[in-house]
Amino acid sequence: MNRTTRLFLRRLASGSLVASACAIGFASTGQTQVLGPLVQVTGADPFTSCTKDNVHQQETTFGSFLYPNTSIEPWVAVDPTDPSRLLVGHQQDRWSDGGARSDIDALSNDGGATWTNAIPPNPPGVTECTGGKDARASDPWTAFANDGTALFLSLVLDPAKPTTPFGARHSGVLVSRSADHGATWGSPVALITNNSPHVLNDKTSMTADPTENGLVYAAWDQLSVFPPSDAGAAVLAQNEGIPIARELLNSKAGASAVCVPFTKPPCKGGAPFFKFNFTGPSLLAISADNGVTWRSPAAIYSPGTNAQTIDNLVQVTPNGNVYDFFTAINAPTPGALNIGYVWSANKGIGWSPPTFVTDIQVAGVVSPDSGQPLRDASILFAVSANPVNGAIYLTWQDDRFTATTCTTPTGTIPIDGIAFAQSLDGGATWSTPVQINKTPANATNPCREQAFIPAVVATGDGKSVVVTYYDFRNDTNTPAGFEGTDYFAIFCLTASDCSNPANWGNEQKLTEASFNILDAPVARGHFLGDYMGLAASGPTTVYPVFGIPTGQNTTAEFTRKISGLP
């Protein structure tokens, strides 16, 4: 344990990093919320003695670097049969070039006050370190069915760089199931397995249908090179879809001319080092028995040649309609970057043509002082359906709202803020995107105005919308090299017009002390996750789950209960 970690844990234990519960006012109503203490969700590294995945061989063969004691990219689900039961999934021990040693869970049965991190970890059978066959896992996702059945989704892969198009010789999607609310788990079921190096499954998500017990939807994108002989020997050599998607977005039209290496901001118009044709449709698998069995995955939207989707997220509105939202890259036109969706009125049997909601204008975020690249949520989004009135809320990073730029030693880029749009009529019409984060202007260093990795959820009673995000407003670069970062929540009452930025307020800082973003491990940029968790519990409570570095190249997940929402 290094000195930084010891100091962090000492402050955590002493209470300087853990706030006692406090009341916070909701300005437009006079009602109060209660912000609970900051609680660490994840525990000690369970893989310190694992040798089955042969870390040294992976590092020497692939040039990879492992970050032990890192918990990355959390997702959280709440049991509808007991709103005090929370299930978090996260990556454990992140690799520098994609995936982690496994996806594992943390379980709370007391509203997030305490957490169980099982040893050996749950769910079993995902990767070699948990009794499975694959070396790495990514994109953890948790869900509870209406009857309390717990479900855990993982993307798995075996790296195979540098002689395969996507840096993996195998990828698949696994679902684990627990019939006792997450206490014990069965062996995972494979929804898809591709042993071709010319195929990469990526960016998985899962949704249990809140309107019909038994129905569960798993969605992801699948990249395929065609014909396989086009792949040749020169390759992307990246085994995860986000960096690949960014490179493809910034390539020339037609057969992809990929900029190399992956940089942040993304390279634009660089010299091609490889050309191939590819497809990237949205795939969906459906279970009608809460994950016991699954229909074969099928493409529900195909954007065409040299185009793809990513970040497929399923939402179900109270009338039972099912929506799959996605980011479309090079669709509907070459060079385009849009949030779109398809929808189904018959529980996924048939699907509509695509509707495109808005474009994404994004630069990506760098650290505010030294300009080091961050792996953020640029090109991604978050979505939530109101469980009462069916309104749909979108949030994402976007740089369209200000002409101010961020200049660091590494260059000048636009400033990303947190964008929001909503539909009150089932997706037929959408509000104009607006910026809702309250990060203050900073004339001394505009880079401290950047905000990133938003999450969104509607409360169970449908009366409030909550959005969370990181920003750098408290950074002073003191001491030099400490680039201060915090996590925030902001709120809107649905009785007001949430498409008006003035109706977003009562912003609350969820971190108790700023952390150094440069302590986050480097996985194509300092990385805490492509997404963070945020879930509603009961009518007026939400639980954000988010990453904080606890020392150099070590991270943990934390939560802070927000209750009493209007």
Image (cartoon, grey):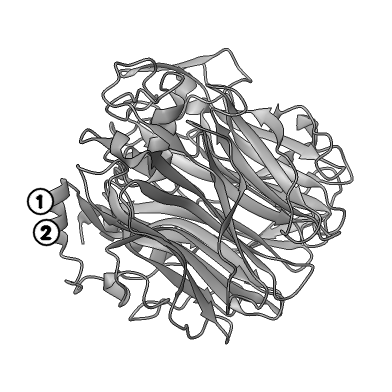
In the image, residue 528 above or below residue 285:
above
Tell me where residue 43 appears, x and y as whole percent.
Answer: 37, 70
Q: Quadrant of residue 332?
A: top right
Separation of residues labelled 2 and 1 (CA atoms): 6 Å
Residue 33, horizontal then vertical, whole percent: 74, 57
Q: Does residue 70 appear to the left or right of 343 in the view shown?
A: left
* Residue 439 visible in the snapshot: no
Which quarter of the image is occupied by the C terminus?
A: bottom right
Q: Front-most of 482 and 522?
A: 522
Figure disc tally = 2
Q: Residues within 10 Å of mark 1 (few under 14, many from 20)?
A: few
Image side of residue 523 versus residue 37, left or right: left
- Which quarter of the figure is the N terminus placed in? bottom left
Under tag 1, what secondary structure? helix
Instruction: Using the image, determine if residue 450 lies above or below residue 5.
Output: above
Tell me whether the residue at label 2 lies in contact with that at label 1, contact meaning CB atoms closer than 8 angstroms: yes
From the viewer's perspective, is 556 left or right of 439?
left
Mark number displayed over residue 56: 2
Question: 243 or 164, which is in the foreground?
Answer: 164
Kindly state the secondary structure of the residue where label 2 is placed: helix
x and y percentages locating residue 165 in the rendered image? 30, 40
Q: Residue at x 87, y 41 (%)?
A: 496
What percent of the width, then of the height, locates residue 432? 76, 27
Amino acid at the residue labelled 1: Thr
Q: Residue at x 56, y 60 (%)?
A: 297
Who's the residue at 29% across and 38% down the image? 229
Q: Nearer the viewer, residue 416 or 270?
A: 270
Q: What's the residue type where badge 2 is placed? A: His
Read off the residue under disc 1: 60
